[in-house]
Image (cartoon, helix red, strand yellow):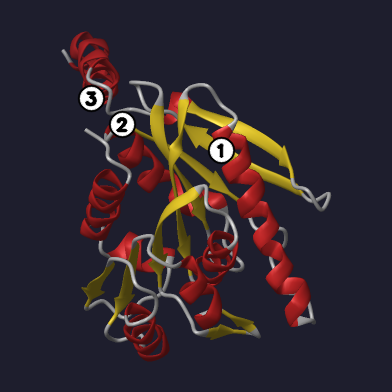
Amino acid sequence: MIRAFAIPIALVLAVLAVAPRIVAAQFGFLRGSNRNAVTIRADDGRTVTGFIVEADQRPAAAVVLVPMLGRSKDDWQQTAERFADANITALAIDLPGQSAPAEARDLTAWHTVIGAAVGYLAARSDVRASAIGVAGASLGANLAVIAAASDSRIRSLALISPSLDYRGVRIENSFKQYGERPALLLASRKDPYAARSARELSAAGGGVREMQWAETPAHGTVLLSREPDLIRSLVEWFRRTLAVN
């Protein structure tokens, strides 16, 4: 009797394991297969590596996702999928290195990879060039501000755990230069320097500045992984500021 039921039970278990993935694919929830690798050349010769998850309805708004120092673009996988589900194409990129260069000016120069990513999106016929935003975490947030200060193609920012001064990468003046364009500032109340930086930045510039607070003691993309509801806040921010229906 044991042998008679061994095969049917195994088949049932296999079907149960596969069924959720089939259903997810049918209804558009399984986006791993829609992730495509991207390589871009920046103006200063740096090579930008990333992945893109495309919105189903195009041309679409788009967002560049910039990671923390020492972390990779893969931190943004779940967030990129949520953006695509909301009809926003997401391009997650790597920083030029996993450790910071010794000189602050060399670290600041990393912002060129963001400009390259924005240029890549703006040149695509399936992207609305007038509706491109950037979300950055920790150092990625600081670099996003510096890139946006001189790049009017960046129409909206989301800064997760920003720092007024990250190893010499200072952003207060650049944030003022960003001007009237909107910015979301997101930080944990239990991340003191990021929280203070967010408060001070919220008073800089003349445009819309929205604060989003978290209670989890975490920083950057780690905060998003520990409080997944914050990803919804990011998506909704860009839906509003990039005029996504």
Amino acid under disc 2: Asn
Closer to the chain start, of discs 1 and 2, is 1
Location of residue 4 in the rendering, given as x and y in whole percent from the top left corner = 20, 8
Can you identify the residue that label 3 sits on? 20
Q: Quadrant of residue 214?
A: bottom left
Q: Is residue 99 visible?
A: no
Indicate which label's residue lies in the foreground, 1 or 2.
Answer: 2
Q: How many marks?
A: 3
Q: Is residue 87 above or below residue 70?
A: above
- 190 and 6: which one is in front? 190
Indicate which label's residue lies in the foreground, 1 or 3.
Answer: 1
Indicate which label's residue lies in the foreground, 3 or 2.
Answer: 2
- Which secondary structure lies at badge 3? helix
Quarter of the figure with the N terminus: top left
Can you identify the residue that label 1 sits on? 51
- Which secondary structure lies at badge 1? strand
Closer to the chain start, of discs 3 and 2, is 3
Instruction: Answer with left or right where residue 205 lies relative to residue 108.
Output: left
Residue 87 shows which numbered tag?
Answer: 2
Q: State the CA–CA distance, disc 1 to disc 3.
A: 25 Å
Instruction: Answer with left or right where residue 25 lies relative to residue 70.
Output: left
Amino acid under disc 1: Phe
Closer to the chain start, of discs 1 and 3, is 3
Location of residue 137 in the rendering, given as x and y in whole percent from the top left corner = 47, 65
> Is there CB contact under 8 Å for labels 1 and 2?
no
Instruction: Answer with left or right where residue 19 lies relative to residue 55.
Output: left
Q: State the CA–CA distance, disc 1 to disc 2.
A: 17 Å
Q: Is residue 168 above or below residue 147?
A: below
